[in-house]
Amino acid sequence: MAVDVGHYQGEPGVISASGRAEFEYNLELASQLKDLLKEAGLKVRMIGERGDYAILHYRTRDAAGADLFLSIHHDSVRLSQLPHAHRFAGFSLFVSRRNPQADKSLACASAIGARLRAAGFAPSRYHADPVLGENRPFADEINGVHYYDNLTVARSAAMPAVLVEAGVIVNPAEEARLRDPQLRSRMAAAIASGVLACLVAALPARADLYRWIDPETGAIKYSSYPPPWVGDAERERHLPPVEVLRYTPRGAARTPEGDKAIAPLEDRRRRLLQELLALPERKDRGPDEVQRQLQAYQQLAYELDRLDPKGAAARKAEDYEVMERIRRRLEVNAR
Ligand SMILES: [Zn+2]
């Protein structure tokens, strides 16, 4: 996954209502996004975080090998509209039909837009406006995705590419909102969740996955690399056990016994997910109940993945959704 920080020191983009450069905003949001995506087990390459990328197509060149190129920007309005900047707000997403993976780009942009909306952010209609904006056609109107076919970073990328305009920083009220670290965290989480939904749901697993409980946060971690204590017998004794989810190629042999076992396990998995989702609201739950139920769930999911590797990616995407909702509910309840 490549996360591109829009603009560079020599040309730092839009100057906000308060006089701060867009590059600073892009860097803050992109860095937070990087942390979240890494936490979720993706390998992330940052492009332009030192502010030294003056040539646009070097950005996509240096992202070679990534499954998605995501460019982070903050928005302005046309010069003639600057005196009325307070009227413009919201996020916008852009994809190019000239990108070699245009369909996948749009799917990822739509997933990101949908998560942003679910997190309470509204898409801007400004870029589509024929008079005030640039008359850019909508690719997915509900989720705020536009076609911008000549957009260099989207067009020159060999992989699916999406450009995010997080908000309109020439609008003083919107700029103030975007400066709020809490709002920024919410926005980064929504974008990360969209990226994961798009990548994890659509890509087959290609390697073994390691799964363990983070000793500091108690969160479940997935990674294609084992945590640092694996192989160190002394540390392994004190730290959480690490499960290896073996990669089974598509079309791996399935046995009749295996098939028979899947349906009831799948039913049980769905019930457990529903129970988990209800847990944050339950007043009678014990201190470790969420963690315990999660572990029970993970064991079941592991068994299912072994019996039905083809369904693993779809299940993982569904898990991620539910885990996100649980996390948000726990956060709200903790306030
Ligand atoms: Zn920009």
Image (cartoon, helix red, strand yellow):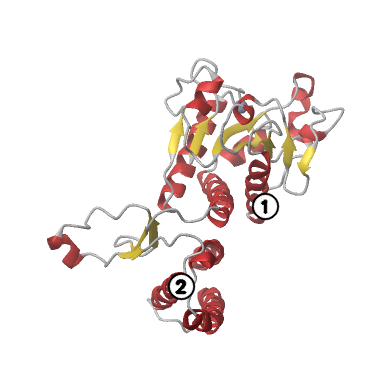
Pick the residue in front: 264 or 222. Answer: 264
Residue 44 sits above or below residue 171 on the image: below
Camera-nearest residue between 305 and 94: 305
Disc nearer the start of the sequence (1/2): 1
Image location (x, y in percent) of residue 209: 38, 58
Q: Secondary structure at mark 1?
A: helix
Instruction: Decide if ligand 1 comes within 8 Å of the CB at mark 2.
Output: no
> Element at badge 2?
helix
Q: Position of residue 108 (x, y in %)?
A: 62, 46
Mark 1, residue position = 114
The one of 17 and 330 positioned closer to us in this rendering: 330
Residue 283 is at least partly visible in this image: no
Regarding residue 180, the answer to whether it shows in the image is yes
Identified at 53% across, 51% down, the residue is 189
* Location of residue 246 with respect to 31 vertically, above or below: below
Q: Are the two marked residues, 1 and 2, in contact with CB atoms closer than 8 angstroms? A: no
State the image coordinates of residue 163 (x, y, percent, origin top left): 62, 35
Q: Residue at x 35, y 61 (%)?
A: 217
Left or right: 129 in relation to 11: right
Q: Quadrant of ligand 1?
A: top right
Image position of 135 with respect to 119: above or below: above
Q: Which mark is residue 281?
A: none
Residue visible at 59% across and 32% down in the picture? 73
Q: Which residue is mark 2?
A: 301
